[in-house]
Image (spheres, rainbow, N blue to C red):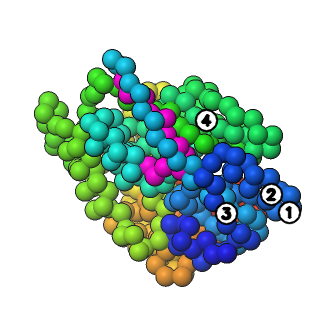
Amino acid sequence: MTLKPLNTFSLNVYAHQVVTAHSENQLLMLWKHALQINRPALLLGSGSNVLFLENYTGTVLLNRIKGIVIREDAEAWYLHVGAGEVWHDLVIYTLERKIPGLENLALIPGYIGSAPIQNIGAYGVALQDLCEYVDIIQLDHGTKLRLNALECQFGYRDSIFKHRYRENVAIVAVGLRLSKFWRPVLNYGNLKQLDTHNVTPRQIFDTICAMRRNKLPNSKTGNAGSFFKNPLIDTKTAAQLLACYPDAPYSPQTNGGIKLAAGWLIDRCKLKGYQVGHAAVYEKQALILINIGQASGLEIATLAKYVRYIVADKFAIWLEPEVRFIGAEGEVDAIGALL
């Protein structure tokens, strides 16, 4: 069965079969059935953060468990959200109910279940700032666990779900805590022009949607958003870099490190528009790799490898993919695939 409509790169790859789960019991049943027929199984949300390198030999299982439950007290709203809810729709849902807190994360593609894996973040806000817990099912034996935010081991575009709970685990719900003592986060881009004292969550939402639509390809152009993570370097390395490139954008981190802008590094290597087959570096935003025709996953990976080596040659910084790489049998090490 074709996976072209199920991955935002629009790669023309196939799986043995595609099935959909709307409940936890159904999810377990479909997973067990895939194993009974001796096929690998892959959980997939919207396919907005994956790169299929080739056809997948197993069962693709779409997690579409829905539901939103809200409770509140004097300090916060507490949301219990099914993994199959669309993230951006949740942002709109909360704003319509006068519940602020998610506006900086507008227009991030994907489903709720994928958000903790990547610890999604944008414009100064990350999921870890809002997450109270994540409910998971260990699919091999059906055990359900609730991990609190600390147990999720969130890091920059990282979590325990990329490590200890990477395989044979399904996220079925996410708990969010949105404070009633709302403070706007206006540290990036056009947000800096907004009035801190009078701005509304809706104004922030609208501004971010405009910024993202301006720099992202249209929906007909295959892409997975930011392909690489913004690199984290130590202060000594940052000082050396900034001495040579004083215009380089950077952001000090709470752990003492410095975060650089991967898009700026790629841009300074004059790679915007660079093409490998039907894959290219997006001309408006160097951090995005696009499918400009009938690109294969290997073409996009080859382009990513070239970008990594050019940036490393110029800046001595190795970029790490944010996108997950999927081979014939399942997820493969993305960095290893680009060596």
User: Residue at 81% of width from left, 40% of height from top?
Assistant: 141
In the rendered structure, the answer to whether residue 295 lies left or right of residue 238 reads: right
Q: Give the residue drawn at x 30%, y 35%.
A: 99
| Numbered disc 2: secondary structure | helix
**Which of the numbered marks, if any, corresponds to residue 135?**
4
Give the image quarter of residue 1.
bottom right
Identify residue type, mark 1. Answer: Ile
**Residue 249 visible:** no
Q: Which residue is drawn at 75% across and 52% down?
A: 29
For the residues bearing labels 1 and 2, Cβ distance under 8 angstroms: yes
Q: Name the residue under label 2.
A: 33
Q: Rounded to the nearest whole Å, what is the CA distance between mark 1 and mark 2?
A: 6 Å
Q: As drawn, is 109 to the left or to the right of 137?
A: left
Which residue is identified by label 3? 19
Inspect the image, locate mark 4, and give the three-letter code of the amino acid beneath it.
Asp
The relative height of residue 316 versus residue 221 in the rendered view (above or below) is above
Residue 277 sits in which quadrant? bottom right
- Magenta stretch containing residue 82, yes or no? yes
Q: Where is residue 151 in the image (x, y as percent from the top left)?
A: 62, 27
